[in-house]
Structure formats: structure tokens, C-alpha cells
Amino acid sequence: MTSAWSHRGFREVNKMLTSLRHSAAMNATSYEERMRNLLVARSAAALRLASTFGGLAEPTTEAANSPRLWPSIRGEIASLERLNCAVHRQGGVSWDALASFYGVSKQSVHRRLSKDVDSHIEYAQRYIELYEADVHSGIRYLRVAANITADQVLVGADRQARIWSQRRRVPTWWWRDNS
């Protein structure tokens, strides 16, 4: 019985120490720096999503023609939603206000987002260099994507339509998709 209590007590102490370390790390940076890092992380997530959608504009890309694309897009949208919520929470917006924007109860939005919001805030502080690199690469990709002409898209759509016509005649072709 003593060992079970000791083990449980150890876990509780460990949680408290982790919480204190997290609080100390968060207090070590200024509010403006934490908010800047969070905004950079949100921008990186938005650029990843924009790049994914930009890839759909070119009909000949493998990603645009893969059935695996949509689940990843849902994940990117969910991540962007949580980062956006984290920005608003850090900016002082209450869970009540967020709930009213979502049209749900405070408890519902808190239960759904709070854990992920906290982890996104922490990750934005820890991995800011990666998020900054993502912003640079996302902007470079979008600049290249912006140079695609309408003629390239239309010619690509014609070519891809022929490929889709051939694919639909092959049973279960999508299981062989490696993209």
C-alpha cells in the first residue's frame, strides 16, 4: 500500500515540477516575444496549408491526384485552428468569447481545444527556428506557384483528364497510389 501511494505521490510531484519548469520557461520570455513566436507558428501553418492548396491548382502534381491528400488537409486545418485559438487566448480572449464565436458552450470549446492550445503555445516557444524556416520556404513555394500561368493549368488539366480516363478502367487503382 505504501509503494502505491509513493508511486502516485511521485507522479504528482513530477507533474508539479514539470508545471513549474513550464511556467519558468514561459516567464523567462517577454509577452511580446511569446506572442511573436506564436504568430510566426500560425503563419507557418497557414503557409503550409496555402502551399497544399496551391499544389491543387496544378492538376498534374501527384499530391493533387492522391486520395491521401484530404486527410492531411483536415489535419493542417485543425492545427491552424488550434494555433489561431492559442493566439487569441494569449491575447486575452476568454473561453466564453471563443465559445460564442463557435456557437457552442464554453465547456465544449474548452474541452475540445484547451489541451492542444497549451501544447501549441509551448511548441511555438521551443521550435521557433523551425517555424521561421517554414515561413521562408512557404513564401518561396508560393512565389513559384504564383508564376504558373493559366495556360499551364489548362494544358495540365487536359493531360490529367486523359490519365483519369485510363485510371477509372483499372479496378482498385487507388490502392497502388504511392503518393
Image: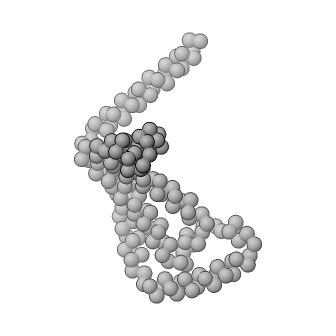
Q: How many marks?
A: 0
Residue 18 higher or lower than 104, as above or below? above
Q: Position of residue 67 (x, y in %)?
A: 61, 66
Q: Position of residue 123 (x, y in %)?
A: 40, 46
Q: Is residue 126 visible?
A: no
Q: Quadrant of the C terminus?
A: bottom right
- Residue found at x 52% / y 58%: 74
Q: Is residue 108 visible?
A: yes
Q: Nearer the viewer, residue 95 or 47?
A: 95
Q: Quadrant of residue 142?
A: bottom left
Q: Quadrant of the N terminus?
A: top right
Residue 5 higher or lower than 75, as above or below? above
Determine whether, in the image, residue 166 is placed left or right of residue 5. Answer: right
- Residue found at x 40% / y 61%: 46
- Residue found at x 49% / y 83%: 153
Residue 78 higher or lower than 67, as above or below? above
Residue most toward the right?
A: 171
Q: Nearer the viewer, residue 62 or 82?
A: 82
Looking at the picture, the colour scheme in use is one colour
Determine whether, in the image, residue 179 is placed left or right of residue 32. Answer: right
- Residue found at x 74% / y 76%: 170
Q: Quadrant of residue 177?
A: bottom right
Q: Nearer the viewer, residue 145 or 136?
A: 145
Q: Nearer the viewer, residue 97 or 147?
A: 97
Q: Quadrant of residue 3?
A: top right
Residue most toward the top?
A: 2
Q: Position of residue 56 (x, y in %)?
A: 50, 72
Q: Position of residue 84 (x, y in %)?
A: 37, 52
